[in-house]
Image (cartoon, grey):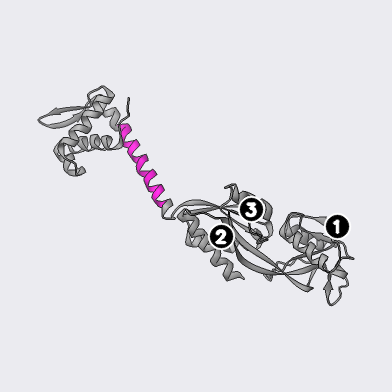
Amino acid sequence: MREFNLDQLRTLIAVVDLGSLASASSALNLAQPTISLHLKELESKLKVRLLERSRRGVRPTSAGTILIEHAREILAIADRASEAVRSHREGLIGVVRVGASAGLIAHHMPNVLQELAMRRPDIRIELSVTTTATANAMLLGGELDFAFVGASQRQSGLTVIRWREDPLVAYLPADWAVPRRVTAAWLQEQPLLTNEPGSALHHQTLQWFAQAGFLLQPRIALNNGEALKSLVAAGYGAAILPFDPTPGRIPAGIQVRAIAPAMKRSTFLAFKSSQSVAESMRAVGDILRTCGKSQS
């Protein structure tokens, strides 16, 4: 048996609420024969009388009363579903998933999230801690919508744009005697702490030492810049990390020195190349690009 449709339910409710087929016809902007057809189809499909007609108007039968009660709920749900889809299409609501390193989330994402909340309060941002390699895989697998990555290697299916650049500096225990120029030659003789293998910063640090003719052998590797700074402050070793000029970001027990030759860490915004993008994603992408430019 084919089920009844929403138009038939709207017709039934209009007839009962307004008291006549003629009034429902005018309210729904439908011809009266169409109103009659909707009611006849409903009664035929359900095999029960839904309305009683008299000189005083139209009243629902007991079966009609039961159907109308459910019909109002069904139509309310349908209206909410239509409104939700419309809002999603116009970028008013939605969930956008963003991946970034722990350090970037701690240092830069608060400002970005504040901007997103101000300009798009109905879009919820879900953050995931990722490395460049895992972010690329999650983007291609549809698990992320955007990711901040530390390498611009072209990967089929992904679009990558430069987001910001930060100088890399040496974080050193405060009680170390440090030369005026902190070079790879000097650092390779010290206990060194790095980001974990697989991260873009680890790879970049390896290349910096290799260009000076040294093979990097870190004392420890962690994917958490704040944890590395804590170890530096405890005198456990030195680390090369992005410089954060925000007051209070450098823990006590640490001295910061520029490295020679100078090196910068580039951060890129990556997202899946697609011809069709939801408006909420487009809106978030535009805001992320703007935030990156304002922080560079």
Residue type, label 2: Leu
Residue type, label 3: Asn
Which residue appears at 42% of the width and 52% of the height?
89
Question: Which structural element holds mark 3?
Answer: helix
Residue 187: image quadrant is bottom right
Q: Quick check: can you spot residue 20?
A: no
Foreground disc of the pair 1, 3: 3
Q: Which residue is mark 1?
A: 219
* Front residue (pair 232, 140): 140
Does the stretch in magenta take in 81? yes
Residue 151: image quadrant is bottom right
Q: Which residues are magenta?
A: 69-87
Q: Is label 1 in contact with label 3 (beta carbons under 8 Å)?
A: no
Q: Main secondary structure of the magenta part?
A: helix
Label whose residue precedes the other's in the sequence (1 or 3) = 3
* Front residue (pair 281, 253): 281
Numbered label tally: 3
Q: Which residue is mark 3?
A: 136
Label whose residue precedes the other's in the sequence (3 or 2) = 2
Q: Position of residue 231 (x, y in %)?
A: 81, 59
Alpha-carbon neighbours of circle 2 within 10 Å: few (<14), some, or many (≥20)?
some
